[in-house]
């Protein structure tokens, strides 16, 4: 690109910041193999956090276009289908942890201190946005309910006459897809934890695998199941 104000690929993506954000904390005495394993561990988690950020944005935008009197279910579908796709991608990404051996993980794990995935504010925000935390209803499901009420149809009627519901029916089905794909993501997380830490306590002082299994007991949007 030419010109004083041209945008470069690296500059647009802030690659200097992103690629410089991996700082393993394990001491050098652990060796280059463990250093690379911890670097891998960091990269995978950072990628998760980036996708959580995108998911939260899409859930918010979906609610924004469903709630108004002139709602746009078709536009909401763009956002919601992306959320379901993100869940499927993250479930596949969990497989990467199969390439982090328990031996390598246990070598650097003592140096993580109280740092734990349970501290992920964005993951908790995703659970809240999906209504899984039970502390508040899901904003996107509330917006869907408002749009459905304005259409003059009940949820039962929507499923009995999907052709009449049109885009709203597809929104409902995509919400089910989001719910199922998030549950499968949580199940994949439990499997990886069982393989990596077994019955040991989790990082950050959590109770390990049993702590993660709590996420499997509640599904998003239970009204649709």
Image: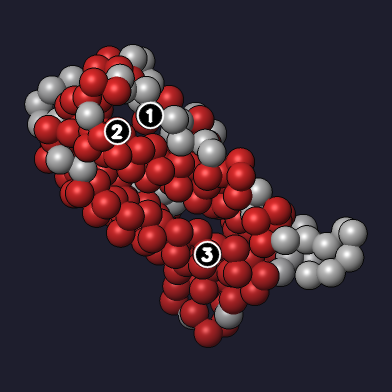
Q: Is residue 82 left or right of residue 91?
A: right
Give the residue drawn at x 44%, y 30%: 23
- Residue 24 percent across, percent down from the top left: 38, 29
Earlier-in-chain disc, 3 versus 1: 1
Give the residue drawn at x 17%, y 45%: 191
Crowding at dot 3, Cα within 10 Å, few <14 / some 14-19 / many 20+, comes out as some
Earlier-in-chain disc, 2 versus 3: 2
Determine the secondary structure under disc 2: helix
- Residue 194 percent across, percent down from the top left: 13, 37
Crowding at dot 2, Cα within 10 Å, few <14 / some 14-19 / many 20+, comes out as many
- Residue 171 percent across, percent down from the top left: 54, 68
> Looking at the image, is 171 positioned above or below residue 192?
below
Earlier-in-chain disc, 1 versus 2: 1
Specify the quadrant of the image occupied by residue 4: bottom right
Tags 1 and 2 touching, CB below 8 Å: yes
Q: CA distance from mark 1 to mark 2?
A: 7 Å
Q: Which residue is mark 3?
A: 82
Tags 2 and 3 touching, CB below 8 Å: no
Which quadrant: the N terminus? bottom right
């Amino acid at each position: 690109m030419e010109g004083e104000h041209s945008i470069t690929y690296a500059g647009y993506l802030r690659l200097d910041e992103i690629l410089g954000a991996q700082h393993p904390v394990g001491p050098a005495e652990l060796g280059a193999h463990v250093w690379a394993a911890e670097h891998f561990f960091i990269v995978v988690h950072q990628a998760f956090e980036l996708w959580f950020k995108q998911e939260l944005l899409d859930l918010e935008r979906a609610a924004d276009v469903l709630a108004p009197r002139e709602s746009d279910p078709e536009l909401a579908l763009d956002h919601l289908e992306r959320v379901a796709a993100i869940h499927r991608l993250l479930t596949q990404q969990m497989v990467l942890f199969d390439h982090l051996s328990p031996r390598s993980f246990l070598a650097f794990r003592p140096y993580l201190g109280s740092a734990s995935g349970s501290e992920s504010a964005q993951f908790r925000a995703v659970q809240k946005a999906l209504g899984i935390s039970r502390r508040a209803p899901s904003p996107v499901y509330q917006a869907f309910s408002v749009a459905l009420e304005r259409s003059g149809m009940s949820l039962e009627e929507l499923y009995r006459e999907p052709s009449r519901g049109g885009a709203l029916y597809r929104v409902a089905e995509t919400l089910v897809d989001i719910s199922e794909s998030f549950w499968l993501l949580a199940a994949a997380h439990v499997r990886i934890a069982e393989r990596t830490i077994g019955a040991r306590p989790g990082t950050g002082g959590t109770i390990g695998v049993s702590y993660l299994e709590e996420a499997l007991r509640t599904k998003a949007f239970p009204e649709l199941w």
